[in-house]
Image: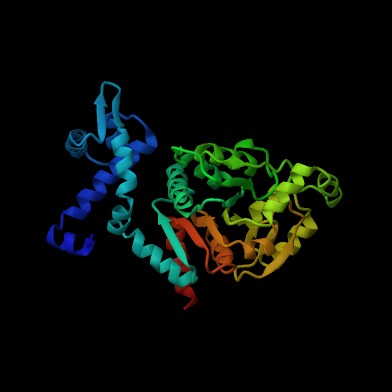
């Protein structure tokens, strides 16, 4: 579709399309809502909400009951079908291309929202990345996933497969943190269940000592998982801030001060980098190494929020051929930082 031609011929098309799409998207995120509640939360007049809901109901995109307004299965399917048009009309496609240019990476996908302000932005990151994974997988692939809140949202938004896939999902790093939901093992298991494919577990803490790891490698299952980790076909990973990951790893004060003195802003797989992508420190970490990272054919990095911007810029320098999925707040701040450099 030639969006510019359509909007020049029907100028009101852009605003109407965005409005209806965002009402459907909001209902998809929030669940059943009353008309007044929907009006208040979206900051749209009740009259407009009433008129648009009437149209969406006639199209069978929503149901209206005494309990409130609910998006239908057909409405959810159309959200996915109309996503690319929405992104073009909402200038997200143009924003993505700008980020590709300033970061010099293969592909950038920008989703609506700000992850540090709206929980819905995590859902948007999850939906977009889940779609990307489904399109990227090939028969026989081994997919590695890291842990974290953003990766957990991807598992939550993955659609159930109609059949079984010849794919294996494995955690790309050991367990880190206290929340089981955000562990790489849990995420690998959930994605595999959704896709109807095999998965492996890595029952090892990310901070296990070399001595402990030597003992664990005597276990055949651990050895087999490690062998697959060295031959990943695709990796999906969250981009971490250096200061946050230092706290999670309980790094001692002397080492912490050294890492900050060298201006580390990002962490990936136990490696810490400055904003130019120079490694400043390497900690003990179980899972893939940075050397493994450079050998994996397909890479998808995911992050959202204003506070992740320096980390995103840093990690983007490591693999120009990677695909990045970020939110609007991160994208706009990246442009702001890069404009000051010129």
**Residue in view at x 40 percent, y 63 percent:** 96
Instruction: Count the labels in the image.
Output: 0
- Residue furthest toward the top? 66
Q: Is residue 42 among the parts visible in the rendering? A: no
| Residue farthest toward the bottom in the current orientation of the protein | 342
Which quadrant, please, contains the N terminus?
bottom left
Left-right relation of 57 to 281: left
Q: How is the image coloured?
A: rainbow
User: Does residue 148 appear in the picture of this structure?
Assistant: yes
Q: Where on the picture, by quarter, is residue 26?
A: top left
Q: Residue at x 43, y 37 (%)?
A: 162
User: Where residue 54 sits in the image (x, y, percent)?
Assistant: 18, 34
Reply above or below: 233 against 103.
above
- Asked where in the image residue 269 lies, by quadrant, the reply is bottom right
Residue at (76%, 52%) from the top-left corner?
251
Q: Nearer the viewer, residue 24 or 328?
A: 24
Q: Is residue 242 above or below residue 35?
A: below
| Residue nearest the observer in this picture, 60 or 263 | 60
Left or right for 140, reference 39: right
Q: Position of residue 148 (x, y in %)?
A: 59, 46
Q: Position of residue 58 (x, y in %)?
A: 17, 34
Residue 301, image x and y in percent? 54, 57
Q: Residue at x 28, y 54 (%)?
A: 85
């Amino acid at each position: 579709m030639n969006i510019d031609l359509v909007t020049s011929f029907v100028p009101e098309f852009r605003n109407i399309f965005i409005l209806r799409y965002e009402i459907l998207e909001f209902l998809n995120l929030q669940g059943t809502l009353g008309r007044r509640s929907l009006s208040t939360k979206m900051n749209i007049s009740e009259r407009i909400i009433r008129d648009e809901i009437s149209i969406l109901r006639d199209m069978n995109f929503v149901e209206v009951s005494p309990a409130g307004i609910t998006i239908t299965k057909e409405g959810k399917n159309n959200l996915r079908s109309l996503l690319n048009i929405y992104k073009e009309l909402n200038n997200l496609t143009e924003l993505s291309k700008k980020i590709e240019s300033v970061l010099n990476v293969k592909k950038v996908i920008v989703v609506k929202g700000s992850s540090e302000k709206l929980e819905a932005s995590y859902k948007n990151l999850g939906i977009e990345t889940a779609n990307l994974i489904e399109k990227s997988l090939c028969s026989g692939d081994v997919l590695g996933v890291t842990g974290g809140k953003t990766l957990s949202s991807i598992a939550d938004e993955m659609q159930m497969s109609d059949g079984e896939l010849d794919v294996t999902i494995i955690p790309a790093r050991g367990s880190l943190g206290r929340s089981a939901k955000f562990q790489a093992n849990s995420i690998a298991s959930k994605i595999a269940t959704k896709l109807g494919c095999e998965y492996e577990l890595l029952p090892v803490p990310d901070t296990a000592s070399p001595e402990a790891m030597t003992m664990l490698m005597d276990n055949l299952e651990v050895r087999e998982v490690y062998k697959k980790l060295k031959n990943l076909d695709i990796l999906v990973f969250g981009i971490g801030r250096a200061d946050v990951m230092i706290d999670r790893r309980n790094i001692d004060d002397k080492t912490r001060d050294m890492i900050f003195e060298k201006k580390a802003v990002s962490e990936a797989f136990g490696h810490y980098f400055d904003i130019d992508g120079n490694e400043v420190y390497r900690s003990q970490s179980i899972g893939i190494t940075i050397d493994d990272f450079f050998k994996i054919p397909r890479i998808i990095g995911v992050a959202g929020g204003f506070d992740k911007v320096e980390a995103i810029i840093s990690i983007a320098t490591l693999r120009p051929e990677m695909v990045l999925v970020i939110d609007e707040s991160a994208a706009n701040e990246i442009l702001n930082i890069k404009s000051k450099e010129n």
